[in-house]
């Protein structure tokens, strides 16, 4: 069993390679890692090309959804993108938040951060910045974001519960997140579960759907909604590199599912109000007249 730091190193090293890998390779494999399918062109990713703010130079084909499509980003919002890669979701978020807003991308792979910064410079975006750091220990202060987005990244982090608690910390009261990620129903075959390439490929690092959603509830979020869900089918020409013929038959006929889900949830509180101000104080203040008397 690999340690958390060993798993992080596997992902960091692999995504340093993926940063300079052709998008077609990434889309025809599991998140750009391991074997490439000749049967299926687009295994996990959704089509971004018609989304406003899309930038082809920043699209590495590594996502499993379109979280920005569901994120309800408003003009002037501060948005944090977890695992920002080459910056594509950040640039789409920037289109929504406008010049008056701010977008912060966080990624722990230096090659990805460098690529994203170059893309932002080419686009002339002064309100989009990229920070190197772990998303389970974000390099941002408390209560700074109106919205947090992430696209197929939490499954790569060993301590997913810690990441979700960090999302709660960095969101303002009344803020919310929209995250696309990979989850499981049933247990993966041991050969897939133990393989380092499949971990970096967003599959073996995924956890059970109910456990994932339970972490969100436990962190204190409210109004959780599954905005989109789709099955992820790994092509035979990838599976047969890890499984025997009998193992493949068992895997495909069993009660095992790999899914991409987009989840939305909010942090309790009133948007635009400092965390230390209680709702009862707001209500009391609203009852007071300009002359100092209260009803």
Image (tube, rainbow, N blue to C red):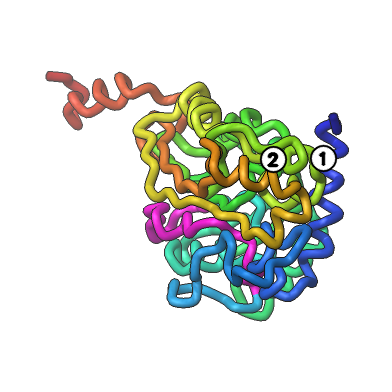
On the question of residue 168 being in view, the answer is no
Marks 1 and 2, how far apart in space? 9 Å
Q: Residue furthest left?
A: 295
> What's the residue at 48%, 46% (across, down)?
261
Q: Which mark is residue 205?
A: 2
- Residue closest to the eye, 91 or 37: 37
Question: In this rendering, would 175 be left or right of 219?
Answer: left
> Considering only vertical position in the picture, is 59 above or below 7?
below
Expressed as whole percent of the image width and height from the top left, the position of residue 16 reads: 83, 61
Residue 198 forms part of the magenta stretch: no
Question: In this rendering, would 119 be left or right of 290?
Answer: right
On the question of residue 211 being in view, the answer is yes
Disc 1 to disc 2: CB gap under 8 Å: yes
Expressed as whole percent of the image width and height from the top left, the position of residue 69 reads: 41, 60
Quadrant of the drawing holding the N terminus? top right
Q: Looking at the rendering, which quadrant does residue 186 occupy?
A: top right
> Considering only vertical position in the picture, is 132 above or below 282?
below
Expressed as whole percent of the image width and height from the top left, the position of residue 279 reads: 32, 24
- Residue closest to the eye, 273 or 9: 9
- From the image, give the main secondary structure of the stretch colored magenta: loop
Question: Which circle's residue, 1 or 2, is located before the other in the chain?
Answer: 1
**Segment colored magenta:** 58-79
Query: Which residue has dot 1 on it?
Result: 7
């Amino acid at each position: 069993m690999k340690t958390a730091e060993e798993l992080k190193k596997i992902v960091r090293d692999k995504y340093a390679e993926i940063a300079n890998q052709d998008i077609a390779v990434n889309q025809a494999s599991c998140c750009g890692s391991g074997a490439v399918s000749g049967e299926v062109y687009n295994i996990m990713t959704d089509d971004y090309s018609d989304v406003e703010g899309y930038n082809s130079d920043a699209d590495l084909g590594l996502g499993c959804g379109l979280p920005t499509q569901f994120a309800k980003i408003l003009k002037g919002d501060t948005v944090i993108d977890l695992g920002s890669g080459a910056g594509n979701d950040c640039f789409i978020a920037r289109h929504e938040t406008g010049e008056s807003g701010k977008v912060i991308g966080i990624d722990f792979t230096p090659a990805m951060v460098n690529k994203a910064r170059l893309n932002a410079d080419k686009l002339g975006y002064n309100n989009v910045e990229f920070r190197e750091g772990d998303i389970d220990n974000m390099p941002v202060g408390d209560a700074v974001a109106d919205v947090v987005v992430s696209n197929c990244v939490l499954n790569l982090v060993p301590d997913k519960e810690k990441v979700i608690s960090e999302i709660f910390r960095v969101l303002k009261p009344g803020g919310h997140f929209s995250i696309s990620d990979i989850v499981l129903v049933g247990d993966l075959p041991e050969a897939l579960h133990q393989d380092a390439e499949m971990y970096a490929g967003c599959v073996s690092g995924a956890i059970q759907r109910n456990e994932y959603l339970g972490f969100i509830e436990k962190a204190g979020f409210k109004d959780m909604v599954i905005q989109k869900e789709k099955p992820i089918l790994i092509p035979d020409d990838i599976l047969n590199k890890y499984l025997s013929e009998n193992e493949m038959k068992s895997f495909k006929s069993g009660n095992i599912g790999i899914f991409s889900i987009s989840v939305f949830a909010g942090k309790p509180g009133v948007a635009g109000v400092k965390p230390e101000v209680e709702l009862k104080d707001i209500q009391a203040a609203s009852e007071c007249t300009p002359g100092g008397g209260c009803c």
